[in-house]
Amino acid sequence: LEILEHAAILHDIGKIGIDSIILNKEDKLTSTEYSLVKAHPLIGEEILGPVDELDDVRTTIMQHHERYDGRGYPYGLAGEELFLKARILSVIDTFDAMLTDRPYRKAFPYPRVLEELRLNAGTQFDPFVVDSFIEMLQIKGEQFLVDVGYGFTFSHDNSVN
């Protein structure tokens, strides 16, 4: 769990090598800009490269944008080729991204976030990880999200389901 925690904290460290104008752009990225953004896992891997104690953290960070179906980046790894911690971080990172306002869009409602995770299980995400994550959310409920830093509260329509 410590490796996953460190990887979650450091997973986007590679964005330090990308111009903030691109990262904060409200409009659609050009193909060149998108290629630069897609390099951030490799930049993160390079930044952490000299620290041998962070090998598993580095691998998790490098793979967090890979997809379960092999259509991710930077290497197009698939399924069991992916480090389990990277498959978990991918779900958590996407969950967080969808619940958070971005320069180019508003946060999604909680029920839609869960639906998107379910819809992408087996393609973008490891289905076992998605099922386990949603089950954990259902068991722990609203207070869990508040405890881990989501300061919002759910309306009746946004209850954990």
Image (spheres, rainbow, N blue to C red):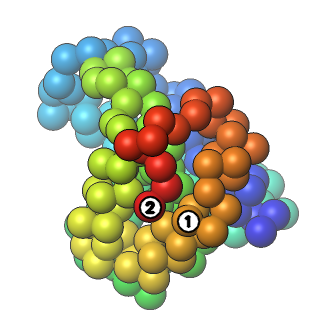
Label 2 element class: loop
- Image-based side of 28 in relation to 96, left or right: left
Q: Tag on residue 161?
A: 2
The kind of residue tagged 1 is Gln
The residue at which mark 1 appears reads as 138
Q: Nearer the viewer, residue 125 or 140?
A: 140
At label 1, counting other C-alpha atoms closer than 10 Å, the crowd grade (few under 14, some 14-19, many 20 or more) is some
Quarter of the image containing the C terminus? bottom left
Residue 149 percent location from the top left of the image: 69, 37
Q: CA distance from mark 2 to mark 1?
A: 6 Å
Q: Nearer the viewer, residue 32 or 87?
A: 87
Measured along the vertical axis of the image, is residue 81 above or below residue 37?
A: below
- Image-based side of 153 in relation to 134, left or right: right
Q: Earlier in the sequence, mark 2 or mark 1?
A: 1
The reply to whether residue 154 is in sight is yes
Residue 154 percent location from the top left of the image: 52, 38
For the point 32% across and 67% down, the residue is 118
Q: Nearer the viewer, residue 77 or 121?
A: 121
Quarter of the image containing the N terminus? bottom right
